[in-house]
């Protein structure tokens, strides 16, 4: 097998998900797995039975085609023969909505690799002598394994998606994401100075998040909220990493909401860890206290990161953020008093119901944070809202006003000494295109290779395919650019991922959306 990551080694090896899948496979006696990145690889096999890819970032998707061609594999699944490897994929992007990449993949693993990868490999061992078609037919019977070639989308005369149905009654009508429910989560299997985060041992503390911000893929797609056992998993994992490196990273959507996090802090406060450099991924503002910030400072951490999304209480209520301005200000106060040098904040523009007053509220809050905490470095990273599958806000589009609102924040925050780091509006548009499209987008992807990080490159390729399909009167005519990216969709509309079931049903997501908008 070849296990690929569609980016450089430094990026790929920092992906904990990629590390865990590779290590799981490498420990098996029935698998000979080699790694492949865009800039380097293990010694390649002369031929592969399996070729896998982990996709956690939409914009990396087109690189899959380059990696396939490099390994002399036809990029389209329907052009592969029995002599070609089975091409499979997994990761957050493909679990949420694999349809734009479906024609390039033979198999998609929907959900947590701890569940699916052993099942997949075990099954492959029992069917290795079958034809390619029959292998895929057998795999299609396994919960969580999606075989795109067995599902056929149907469109009306206007190009509107009507259904996505299996081509035969022997294939399940829907596929359900698989969820790892044990109290042992993951930790690094590779520690290297060449990673994007050099020499770090990463330990997953929690998976999903109990707060359920209405836009958040990490929360909704990964439900239920799961925690790793402190005694049985976290402490042994940290000890194992600390014996190799002094840099430890605790990961999760909201690590401080682990029910035993206080006990973990007490343990990490032991003098044995005095030369540790401890870092935490984003934490909830309401959980920041003097005990936490003093520990981080003592463990050589320079800053703490919290996601506020907006300075507007109205917007925070709508997205279910459940934090007050006072709690944000208090978190900053504790950060400074604890000895930390910086406070990093995540924000978002273009959220549903946002207006100019809400942007003004964000500016005022950031300036207040700066004024009340002289000497504390304030960094504000902001992205544009992008609708994600399986979340209550999946029906909303990207708001064009977001582009100017990013400029407004830049204009008013930078002169106040706030380090402002906006994410490209163009990147957000491309993310939305990929996250909301059906498999017709696959026609566009081969044309954008080499310019896949360019909004202009995507627009040009999209236009070329639209004109081509119009001239040939193709039934697979692309929908309008505006409809895919910016339009608000009706709840009755058939979504590209309707046949792929996440943790919550569509009715539940609609109820969550309605509760948000009632505010």
Image: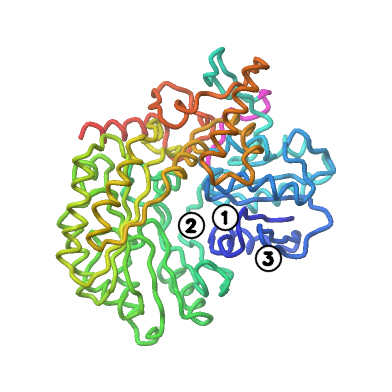
Of residues 73 and 132, the one nearer the viewer is 73
Q: Secondary structure at mark 1?
A: helix
- The answer to whether residue 178 is seen in the rendering is no
Going 56% across and 43% down the picture, which residue do you hit? 94
Instruction: Left or right? Give the position of 276 relative to 60.
Output: left
Q: Earlier in the sequence, mark 3 or mark 1?
A: 3
Q: Which residue is mark 1?
A: 114
Q: Which residue is mark 2?
A: 182
Going 52% across and 23% down the picture, which residue do you hit? 479
Q: How is the image coloured?
A: rainbow
| Dominant secondary structure, magenta | loop
Going 47% across and 78% down the picture, which residue do you hit? 239
Q: Residue 36 location, x and y as percent?
A: 69, 59
Is residue 514 depicted above or below 416 in this figure? above
> Mark on residue 27?
3
Q: How far apart are the alpha carbons under marks 3 and 1?
A: 13 Å
Q: How far apart are the alpha carbons under marks 1 and 2?
A: 10 Å
Q: What residue span does the magenta drawing correspond to?
A: 167-177
Q: Residue 120 location, x and y as percent?
A: 67, 48
Is residue 272 depicted above or below 464 in this figure? below
Of residues 193 and 23, the one nearer the viewer is 193
Q: Residue 201 location, x and y as percent?
A: 50, 72
Q: Image quarter for residue 400?
A: top left
Q: Residue 158 location, x and y as percent?
A: 53, 14
Q: Earlier in the sequence, mark 1 or mark 2?
A: 1
Q: Secondary structure at mark 2?
A: loop
Q: How far apart are the alpha carbons under marks 2 and 3?
A: 20 Å
Other residues around mark 2 within 10 Å, as few (<14) / some (14–19) / many (≥20) = few
């Amino acid at each position: 097998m070849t296990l690929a990551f569609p980016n450089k080694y430094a990026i790929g090896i920092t992906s904990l998900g990629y590390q865990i899948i590779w290590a799981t496979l490498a420990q098996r006696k029935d698998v000979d797995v080699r790694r492949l990145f865009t800039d380097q690889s293990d010694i390649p096999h002369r031929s592969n039975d399996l070729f896998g890819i982990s996709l956690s970032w939409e914009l990396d998707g087109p690189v899959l085609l380059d990696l396939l061609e490099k390994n002399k594999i036809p990029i389209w699944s329907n052009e592969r023969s029995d002599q070609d490897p089975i091409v499979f994929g997994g990761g957050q992007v493909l679990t949420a909505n694999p349809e734009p990449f479906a024609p390039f993949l033979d198999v998609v693993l929907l959900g947590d690799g701890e569940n699916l990868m052993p099942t997949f490999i075990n099954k492959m061992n029992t069917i290795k002598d079958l034809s390619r078609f029959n292998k895929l037919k057998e795999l299609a019977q396994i919960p969580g394994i999606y075989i795109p070639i067995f599902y056929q989308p149907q469109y009306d005369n206007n190009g509107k998606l009507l259904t996505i149905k299996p081509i035969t009654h022997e294939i399940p009508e829907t596929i359900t994401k698989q969820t790892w429910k044990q109290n042992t989560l993951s930790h690094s299997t590779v520690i290297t100075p060449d990673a994007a985060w050099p020499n770090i041992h990463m330990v997953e503390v929690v998976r999903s998040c109990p707060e359920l911000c209405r836009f958040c893929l990490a929360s909704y797609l990964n439900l239920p909220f799961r925690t790793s056992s402190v005694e049985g998993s976290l402490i042994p994992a940290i000890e194992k990493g600390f014996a190799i490196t002094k840099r430890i990273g605790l990961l999760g959507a909201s690590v401080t909401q682990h029910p035993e996090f206080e006990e973990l802090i007490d343990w990490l406060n032991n003098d044995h860890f005095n030369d540790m450099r401890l870092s935490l991924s984003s934490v909830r503002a309401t959980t920041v206290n003097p005990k936490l910030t003093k520990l981080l400072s003592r463990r050589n951490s320079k800053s703490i990161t919290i996601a506020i999304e907006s300075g507007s209480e109205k917007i925070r209520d709508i997205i279910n953020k459940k934090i007050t301005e006072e709690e944000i200000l208090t978190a900053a106060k504790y950060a400074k008093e604890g000895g930390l040098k910086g406070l990093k904040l995540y924000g978002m523009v273009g959220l549903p119901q946002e207006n100019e007053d809400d942007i003004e509220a964000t500016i005022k809050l950031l300036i207040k944070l700066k004024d009340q905490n002289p000497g504390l470095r304030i960094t504000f990273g902001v992205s544009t809202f992008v609708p994600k599958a399986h979340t209550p806000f999946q029906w909303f589009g990207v708001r064009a006003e977001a582009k100017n609102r990013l400029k407004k924040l830049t204009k008013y925050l930078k002169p106040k000494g706030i380090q402002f780091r906006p994410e490209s509006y163009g990147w957000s548009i491309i993310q939305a295109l990929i996250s909301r499209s059906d498999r017709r987008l696959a026609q566009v992807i081969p044309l954008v290779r080499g310019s896949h990080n360019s909004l202009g490159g995507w627009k040009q390729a999209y236009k070329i395919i639209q004109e081509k399909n119009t001239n040939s009167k193709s039934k697979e005519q692309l929908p309008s650019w505006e409809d895919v990216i910016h339009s608000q969709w009706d709840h009755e509309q058939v979504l590209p991922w309707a046949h792929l079931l996440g943790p919550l049903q569509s009715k539940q997501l609609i109820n969550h959306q309605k509760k948000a908008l009632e505010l």
